[in-house]
Image: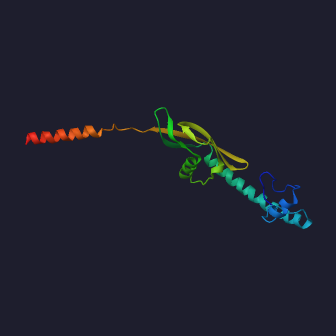
Amino acid sequence: IKDIKGVGKIGDRKKLSGGYVRNYLIPNNLALLITPNNLMKFESIKKQDNKRRLEEQKDAELLKQSLEGKTISITAVAQNEGKLYGSVTIGDVINEITNNFNVKLDKKQIAMPEHLKKAGDYDININLHSEVVCKMKLTVIGQVKKEEPKEDKKDTAKEKAKSKEEEIKTD
């Protein structure tokens, strides 16, 4: 009744072990035994599933048209050479897509290197449907953190003492 990864897709007729079928597939409504009554039931389920898949594919095609070729930018703190202090993850990409395009995606739909640790341009693929893949550009901008010169505590204490001495002398 449903696609099962590593076993088969909906509509496949497979010979499987009896225990697996009786104890797992049938109780979880994942498969049916081949009987004339179940074949008629399966045909109606298959028609409904095909309609649902076509609708999902149409929705995915529309979404692809709105996202295809677009560029998203993520700014991260980096060193002078462009190496990031942290990394840009799939979660960061999903947040940016959600904020910019108001689209909800799952982490499993994004195909990119695990973690991006350098600033630059990257291509990412988004699997919107089993037959619809969208390509987007990701720009990681490395923002160099400007460090303010730190004053030594000893120097500031000496300066305060000198300024107090000068105030005393001027009085």
Which residue is depicted at the point 50% across and 38% down? 84
Question: To which quarter of the image does residue 36 belong?
Answer: bottom right
Q: Position of residue 16 (x, y in %)?
A: 87, 56
Outermost residue to the right: 36
Expressed as whole percent of the image width and height from the top left, the position of residue 31 reads 82, 61
Between 6 and 128, the residue placed more toward the observer is 6
**Image-based side of 39 in relation to 52, left or right:** right
The quadrant of the image that shows the N terminus is bottom right
Which sits in the foreground, 62 or 53? 53
Screen quadrant of the C terminus = top left
* 168 or 136, nearer to the observer: 168
Q: Outermost residue, left direction?
A: 171
Residue lying furthest bottom in this view?
37
Pinpoint residue 166: horizontal percent, then vertical percent: 13, 39
At x 75%, y 55%, the residue is 54
- Tell me: 125 left or right of 34: left
Percent across and percent down for residue 101 are 56, 51
Q: Nearer the viewer, residue 130 or 170?
A: 170
Q: How many marks?
A: 0
Q: Relative to residue 158, is residue 1 drawn left or right?
A: right
